[in-house]
Image (tube, rainbow, N blue to C red):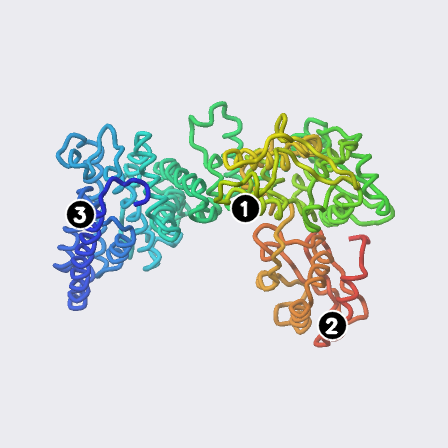
Amino acid sequence: RQFSVQLSEDEIMSLDEGGGQQHETFERLADLVQKQTQEETDEDVVVPAGADLAKRTEELLGHPALLNGHFLSPSELRWMHSTLVSVGNRATRQAVAAAVERGMKRGLHRTNNNSNSEEDEAGGGGGGGRMMHPEQVRHLLLYVQFFAAARQEEDNEGGGKGDECDDEKKGRVEFDEDGSLVSQLCETILGLPWEGHRVFLTWATSIYTSELYAEMLVRPLLSRLDRGLETKVNSDGVQHINRSRRAVPLIVAVLRWLYAASSRAGDIVPPETFYSDSVSHIPPEALFDDLYAMKKAEHSGASFYLSANPFLFSPGTKRELLKMESHVTMMRVAAQDGGISIDQQTGQISVDLFWKLEIERDDMLNQTLDVIRSTDAKELRKKLVVAFKGEEGVDAGGVTKEFFQLISEEMFDITNGMWTDRFGENLTWFNSDCSWDSDSFELTGVLVGLALYNSVLLDVHFPPAVYRKLLGLPLGMEDMVDEELKSGLQSLLDYEGDDVEWVFCLTFEVTWMDMGKEQTVELKPGGSDIPVTSDNREEYVLLYVKWLLVDSIQPQWDAFEKGVMRVMADSSLNMFRPEELQLLVVGTPELDFAALEANAAYEGGFDKDSNVVKNFWRFIQNADREDQINFLRFATGSSMAPIGGLGELGFKIQRAGPDSPQLPTSHTCFNTLLMPDYGDDYEKLKKQLGRAIIECEGFGLQ
């Protein structure tokens, strides 16, 4: 209604009333179907009212003008849809589903072929050459809702969920089994002219609330995508690919439209609404093959690749893909460097994938930077193995995790002059006045790249702007690192008076203090003599944001980014959204220990009902935040949760012999806590575990 839908208010009221009348008609029929169904005991008989309901449904969907006229409000169609998929017995629902399928096919036929019909001339939903008016395309959005029907039916009755194809159709209503209908709808949508495309997305983003956008547009298409990607196994172990697989590229293309429209409108629905469960369950090897084929193809647009649509992938799926990509790169580098050898006598293949970093714990940062400085980029792309001199730890991942946790504290320490805290104590930002040490910024970038490459979390507090810059995305005022300045600039933009120049007293220059000395830079030539007015304030804000986030730190950023890309060049970081990349670098600060407990495993004689295990979880639940973080660092080598939360950690508690005065220990490489069986003595467990997580540092032989 806000986007020039080309309807008068009287017409809108008339259509709303028509929707109400249609609602009442279907409601009466649905009640009658339910009554007749109670009287009819045979599940395979379509009751008379059900046949009438199916006929009316087919007629309604077969005429786009009629559908548009009765359902201006998507919420009314939602009610109708929920009624149709649940009314009566299975035979009645099957009759209605078949009617929906026939009606939509007729409607799409009219849309695509009857461009010169009277219906089209009346602006009521014909199609043809230039589908560019709201009433010519709106019914396409309404059609989308009906593709949730089959999946909802399966969820209600439990049909189609088993592994055996022989029982696939039992108890389930069939709808568009071969995917031809959803293909036809998606082809029609994708074939809209530019004007029709704009109108289609305008309707979607203006008429549909966040709830309706997800329920009536995104989820129905995701359900059909799930169907198309299904692979079932029958009793003989034979795999069967779903017949609607050919519709998958078209469905994904329409979902991509909806995702882009939602993003441009400020996320009508959260991005995670588009995550596909079926994509997440595809074996990582198969997804990597798809990714590799896409990157290898000269013209990726000529073929369909799931990996070209990362908005469908959960952060966990993307993380696994990136890990696999890194591992393949490690193997390739090892092969190029002669790291793969074959024993001529035994035929055994040995692979040396590792780049070993051996340093002293007391001089960790300086020695690490010295080693990186003299190391070739190709060597950095081997698997990192860390050894602390004088310690016997064997690094299966735990030493590396501790290394990055410890070096983060030194690397991003404000006292080294590379970073500034003028935008907040808990925010790490580049010191624009540190122009003498580009080498250290590059080496720091290498360490960040190494952490990403080796799937290890860092303890760093970069703002979202850093992750947007790494992904090459544009920056705006919402990315400002100075909240006070951001608020001031917003006040400048929102000011409604015409005396901006006299109220704000600003010119096109920036002033700040550096070591007690005032520094000034002009935002444009002659900026110190150009006042900020009502007419040029937007330009001032744009230039200020650009200066703060880009120009003022350009040398430092260029060196840092160069370092990251020494390790991560040619990687698939562009799969990630900025928020997801942040999770990949630092994990999530939300520590859900209930999820950790729910997914914990027990070994060596312990189980969830062991007294010492119950006491352990009691200790964790009663511990303060600092002790919980210290425990995580002690048991896993990291103080943060990975993507997906603590439930994804794979945490284990292993019995380390009978009751004894020994402290608990850990295998951080495997996220395993080893604990003597202290029995039901809670105070002893509290004392011993408390000492262990505070006092223990370093690695013995593991």
- Residue 403 location in percent, x, y? 76, 47
Name the residue beneath numbered marker 1.
491
Element type at marker 2? loop
Q: Amino acid at mark 3?
A: Leu
Q: CA distance from mark 1 to mark 2?
A: 61 Å
Q: CA distance from mark 3 to mark 2?
A: 72 Å
Total residue callouts: 3
Disc 1 or 2, which lies upstream in sequence?
1
Nearer to us: label 1 or label 2: 1
Question: Is 469 left, or right, of 126 in this rendering?
Answer: right
- Residue 334 location in percent, x, y? 69, 31
- Residue 70 location in percent, x, y? 20, 49
Name the residue beneath numbered marker 3.
60
Question: Is 92 left, or right, of 387 in this rendering?
Answer: left
Q: Amino acid at mark 1?
A: Ser
Q: Is residue 103 visible?
A: yes
Question: The N terminus is located in which quarter?
Answer: top left
Q: Amino acid at mark 2?
A: Tyr
Name the residue beneath numbered marker 2.
678
User: Which residue sits at x=76%, y=67%?
Assistant: 690
Q: CA distance from mark 3 to mark 1?
A: 52 Å
249, above or below 32, in the image:
above
Q: Nearer the viewer, residue 533 or 208?
A: 533
